[in-house]
Image (tube, rainbow, N blue to C red):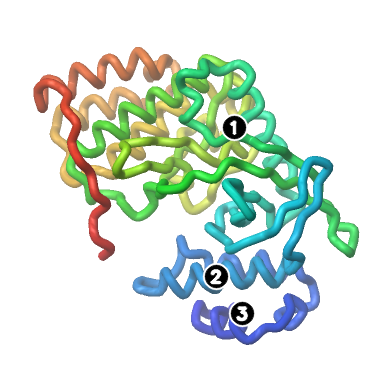
């Protein structure tokens, strides 16, 4: 198997995807696992991002997509995720395009979830998820069909990836509160997100905004989550790993673990609060994110007093 440096070098010198292997899809899947920014060696994150973007461009060199609704011109690759790439379009939109057509069902799940949130969700909380502009099927020259989603672009937002064990609990407090609000909003529509992970929670540092993204793993309440992000296997509750029904308690388990992992040296009362949200048995966990938010507010008041706005800046990269 190629090393990271060998893969970066090969991608940089390739003129087409065929220069890297005879089977384009298999080649892409193999190389993206090596150069994905989330698995890059220390200090090589920028090289990984550049290599992943170029690899995606080699796989899908056509600069335009035409759908029944619009003609989109492709821009830069903004992110390479678990399923595929997020590519800038020519205005305030992005294209989410899967690398493997075997993930078309996950792309359809995301579209269905976002349509449900738009239709049934309380509009006061609409900002907690991106808007779906359209979903369509793209067919390559070789007949390969992929389901792609066009989404609202979220300028100024960054993911929580890479922030584990680095933040003051008072900074995590506003993220935690807003995350529970967003989850409660989704749960009221009957949806479970199913993958509350660092890459799937975006924050706007200045505005204290939070958006839940990547609804590909979402299911209706009581449904079975179809797939996991394997590198985050330890973050999942037992019911997802054993293909049992997912509920609001599933998202609460994952959200609590994520928030706790962000904090540098969490206070003991916060640890105890989190432990009560992460029992193995779903029935023993809190079942209502908004009710849990009220309990969190009581905890935060006891620890830090009345709530006040606390300016936040991302910590410097290590």
Say if 94 sits above or below 169 in the image. Answer: below
Q: Is residue 140 visible in the rendered structure shown here?
A: yes
Quadrant assignment for the N terminus: bottom right
Residue 15: quadrant of the picture: bottom right
What residue do we see at 50% from left, 25% from top? Answer: 126
Cα distance in 3D space between marks 3 and 1: 33 Å
Residue where numbered disc 1 is placed: 218
Residue where numbered disc 2 is placed: 34
In this view of the protein, which residue sits in the foreground, 242 or 130?
A: 130
Left or right, 285 with reference to 76 = left
Cα distance in 3D space between marks 2 and 1: 27 Å
Which secondary structure, mark 3? helix
Mark closer to the chain start, 2 or 1 = 2
Query: Is the C-beta separation of discs 3 and 2 under 8 Å?
Result: no
Residue 112 image position (x, y, % from top left):
68, 30
Residue 71 image position (x, y, % from top left):
77, 51
Residue where numbered disc 3 is placed: 11
What residue do we see at 81% from left, 46% from top? Answer: 67
Left or right, 291 with reference to 66 = left
In this view of the protein, which residue sits in the foreground, 309 or 182?
A: 309
Residue 96 image position (x, y, % from top left):
64, 49
Cα distance in 3D space between marks 3 and 2: 11 Å
Quadrant assignment for the C terminus: bottom left
Say if 291 sits above or below 34 in the image. Answer: above
Residue 58 image position (x, y, % from top left):
70, 72
């Amino acid at each position: 198997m190629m090393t990271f440096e060998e893969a970066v070098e090969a991608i940089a010198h390739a003129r087409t995807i065929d220069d890297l292997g005879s089977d384009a899809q298999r080649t892409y899947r193999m190389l993206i696992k090596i150069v994905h920014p989330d698995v890059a060696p220390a200090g090589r994150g920028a090289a990984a991002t550049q290599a992943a973007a170029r690899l995606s461009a080699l796989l899908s060199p056509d600069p335009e997509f035409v759908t029944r609704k619009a003609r989109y011109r492709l821009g830069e690759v903004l992110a390479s995720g678990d399923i595929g790439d997020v590519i800038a379009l020519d205005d305030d939109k992005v294209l989410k395009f899967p690398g493997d057509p075997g993930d078309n069902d996950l792309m359809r799940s995301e579209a269905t979830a976002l349509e449900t949130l738009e239709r049934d969700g309380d509009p006061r909380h609409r900002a907690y998820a991106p808007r779906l502009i359209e979903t369509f099927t793209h067919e390559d020259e070789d007949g390969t069909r992929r389901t792609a989603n066009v989404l609202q672009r979220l300028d100024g937002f960054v993911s929580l990836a890479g922030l584990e064990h680095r933040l003051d609990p008072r900074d995590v407090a506003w993220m935690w509160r807003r995350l529970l609000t967003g989850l409660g909003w989704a749960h009221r529509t009957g949806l479970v997100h199913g993958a509350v992970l660092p890459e799937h929670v975006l924050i706007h540092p200045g505005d204290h905004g939070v958006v839940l993204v990547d609804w590909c793993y979402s299911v209706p309440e009581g449904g079975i989550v179809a797939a996991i992000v394997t590198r985050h296997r330890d973050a999942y509750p037992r019911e997802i790993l054993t293909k049992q029904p997912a509920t609001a308690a599933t998202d609460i388990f994952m959200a609590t673990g994520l928030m706790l992992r962000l904090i540098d040296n969490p206070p003991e009362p916060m640890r105890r609060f989190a432990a009560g949200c992460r029992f193995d048995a779903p029935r023993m966990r809190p079942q209502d994110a908004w009710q849990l938010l009220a309990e969190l507010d009581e905890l935060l008041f006891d620890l830090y007093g009345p709530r006040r706005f606390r300016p936040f800046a991302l910590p410097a990269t290590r």
